[in-house]
Amino acid sequence: MQAARTRGVRPVGCLRRMQPVKIVIVGCGRVGSTLARRMAKEGHQVAVVDENIAAFARLGEDFEGQMVVGSGIDEEVLRRAGIEQADCFASVTNGDNRNIMAAQVAQSIFKVRRVITRIYDPIRAEVYREIGLETMCPTTIGAGILYEFFGSGRNVAASGTLVGDTAGAQG
Amino acid sequence: MQAARTRGVRPVGCLRRMQPVKIVIVGCGRVGSTLARRMAKEGHQVAVVDENIAAFARLGEDFEGQMVVGSGIDEEVLRRAGIEQADCFASVTNGDNRNIMAAQVAQSIFKVRRVITRIYDPIRAEVYREIGLETMCPTTIGAGILYEFFGSGRNVAASGTLVGDTAGAQG
């Protein structure tokens, strides 16, 4: 395991060293809330948008960011979340279509500098990436991790191996 | 992007060079079916277990593996899927509890050599990993990828960067 860790992508944690940034996250599910909590704790200005008010419970009582109830593809809702001042944007609802549309609004209309969206469909994730939208496809990543493990016995999903230690986000 | 790829975990593709192995996959959702199609195409002996017969449609008409309708925590169902001869096992249903239990049955009762399970809850994923079960947590991975992108502008989810090119699995 140790060998795998040293071979993997090293933890970066650039945000810890950055000036505080303004971040809008659409979708307060597991991934959205984990990211929001971590970034708010590090002193960044975080706004989370979700249509379902109950989803905000995932943020915990000590969450110091902004919670906005509404649709992430509604420009007025995004404005309320402060998207006009945002440096970073992620759409991570359960719907590929909503995620894509919200990210395109953030990128094209509000000119947010770093925009990324989750797309479960691998083919669409690849197509949108090719046309200039940063995408993350859990299907491709998940199948790739299992395939790698079966082939080499190496579990690159082990904490810290892939993209830095995110376990801290769970505290 | 090119720089990121060379820094990332290099594609391994060990399975292509391996003797054919016997693999049991519990859960024929996006990840399970993607993995099953890829491995069957490469000549491995693949069995997929799912309670919902309609899920097998994801495998496509040209899938040459075995499809078993039933619960992945039922030993008799697993035996029908050939688990007693299996080298590799993955549980990737939508339920953490089912995935954990199926993987523990595969590991402890059937002594499958390479067992891995998907657990959405980051805390449980970490605990089970510590007690000897290989786990993959999409929540930790997803939040980590977004965090890394916001900090460095580098999208490690881009095809081929993380764990080899899995795009081929979509053909």
Image: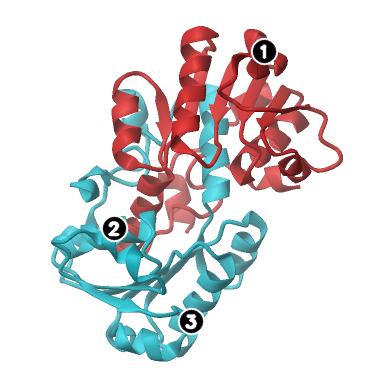
Chain colours: A cyan, B red
User: Which one is closest to the eye, mark 3 or mark 1?
Assistant: 1
Say which residue appears at 83% left-offset and 29% top-offset. B64
Q: Tell me the number on the disc at residue B79.
A: 1
The label number, if any, that marks residue A164 in the structure image: none
Given the image, on which type of amino acid does mark 1 rest?
A: Arg
The quarter of the displayed image where residue B123 is located: top left
**Which label's residue is closer to the chain start, 2 or 3?**
2
Alpha carbons under labels 1 and 2: distance apart: 39 Å
Q: Is residue B129 above or below residue A122?
A: above
Q: Is residue B117 left or right of residue B52?
A: left
Query: Which chain contains the residue that carries disc 2?
Result: A
SS state under label 1: helix
Q: Tell if the residue under mark 1 belongs to the same chain as the one under mark 2.
A: no
**How many C-alpha atoms fall within 10 Å of the one at disc 3: few (<14), some, or many (≥20)?**
some
* Residue A25 shows up from this direction: yes
**Badge 2 is on which residue?**
A58
Measured as percent of width and height from the top left, residue B24 is found at 64, 23
Write down the chain letter for disc 3: A
Q: Which residue is drawn at 37% across and 56% down?
A: A31
